Image (cartoon, rainbow, N blue to C red):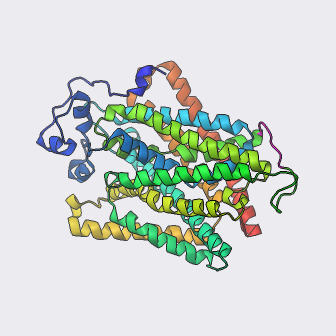
Amino acid sequence: MATSDFDTTPEPFGETASCDSHKQDITGDSLDEPQKQAASDIQPDANERFVEHAVQRNGSWLGAIMNIMCISIGTGTMNLPKVVSRVGWFGIILFMLMAVVGWYVGVLFRRAMYATPGRRVSSFALVTKAAFGKFGFWFATAITYLYCCGTALSWIIVCGTQISRLIGFAGGHLDEKISMTIIAVVMWVPFTALKTLREITISSMFGVLTALFTVLVLAVTSLQHRYTDSYHAPEFDGAPKHEFIIGKGIPSAIASISFMYAGSVAFPHVEGNMRKPQQFGWMLFAANSLVCGAYLLSSVTGYVAFGDQTVSPILNNLPNLAIVNAATIVIVVHCVFALPVMLVSASLELELALGVMPGILGKKKELMWRVIMRTVTMGVLLGIAIAIPYFGQVIDLVSAISTTVVFFMVPVFCYVKLLGWNKIPKYELALCGVLAAIGAVACVWGLIDAIKSLETAVELGHG
């Protein structure tokens, strides 16, 4: 990969269109040439309905890192030790490899966003539409919504079950269904109140800090309470076993790990809020590096401590300690702050597709329909969470169905289609083919494993 990929400043496509006064208002300052190019955010056939989704370039690279980390680091850190137990120590290599792949497909996708001379395509679904027409648009809208809603679903489950567990430790009782309902209502407030990502950077920063605190607590507590002959939790069947590599677990592990890096759906919105969009490449590399470090810290220590007896979430491996309970509370708070970052991205795509914007409906009707649609979304997620409250199995299922497509396939296919086979180096075409093939295998194999695991959890009545 060329060093210039860290810059990812769009190459000029002939003469860059000059910014009119409307675009100057959108971007804020006088712009250099790459930013002028980035400001052309309206598709030729979009007319008025995409104006509301024009870029708002008033965010910093630090805010962009916070948004990506907030999307990535969270409840997944409690599932990843279990992922490592399925694949062995080889999982460490997969974490680092997927971080690099996540950065690379992000760079490719941004190139696809600027493939049309003088214009920037403003969303994940619109890039797919530019490449594959209306079918691509609706497919991307559906897969984006599925991915983001699946992530939110896992958050509702883990928050609801862990709150119920904490109350049980305190000697009380709160049914998990009631607990999930309460947490869903709390999450609903910021989800419906906040319209765009630029409104929630502070929320993202708080979410990242709470997630990092939880990672540190999980790592330290896992090592302090690892299995020994003189001390071990009663549910241990014997000394935990550790293996270097478990081949049959690799495809499903790839699907699960890609879930943690699959922020492609939010990349256009994150990049669209950056004052200096040419910094996107190295910003994403820095964000993925920090995310990978957090994943490794929680996963390695969890697998060292509990080996093949690691469960998901790993909180259930740990004793009833004040610091562990504090971390549980913090992860619940993190989910409340992180959910808007994830679901707002998906809702923007759907609202864009259905024309739910002030420029079309007027401010009052747009607000009414936005609240209705997002309330229905939260209600459906709550219903599913109550029906199948199995955290690890839900993440694995969502990973297989959606994130393998979002992470491996869509960015690669859009990049090749929009830039053209003859304009892409052969080695890069080969690499794109390898990534698409890995995604296809992980999707099918991961889906089979996830369904089997979910069936077992339903039969046993626990995850």
Work out whether 238 lies above or below 439: below
Report if residue 283 lies within the magenta region.
Answer: no
Q: How many numbered marks, from 0 up?
A: 0
Residue 243 counted in the magenta span: yes
Indicate whether 444 appears above or below 279.
below
Query: Residue 454, relative to residue 26: is it above or below?
Result: below
Location of residue 98 by image quarter: top right
**Magenta part of the protein: which range?**
240-246
126, above or below 278, in the image: below
Q: Is residue 59 left or right of residue 25?
A: right
Let me know if residue 129 appears in the view. Answer: no
Q: Residue at x 53, y 20 (%)?
A: 427
Q: What's the residue at 50%, 23% (across, down)?
A: 428
For residue 289, side relative to residue 57 (left or right): right
Magenta-colored segment: predominant secondary structure: loop
**Residue placed at 49% from the left, 32% from the top?**
104
Residue 351 coordinates in the image, percent (x, y): 34, 59
In the foreground, 240 or 382: 240
Q: In the visual, does 363 lie left or right of 210?
A: left
154 or 126: nearer the viewer? 154
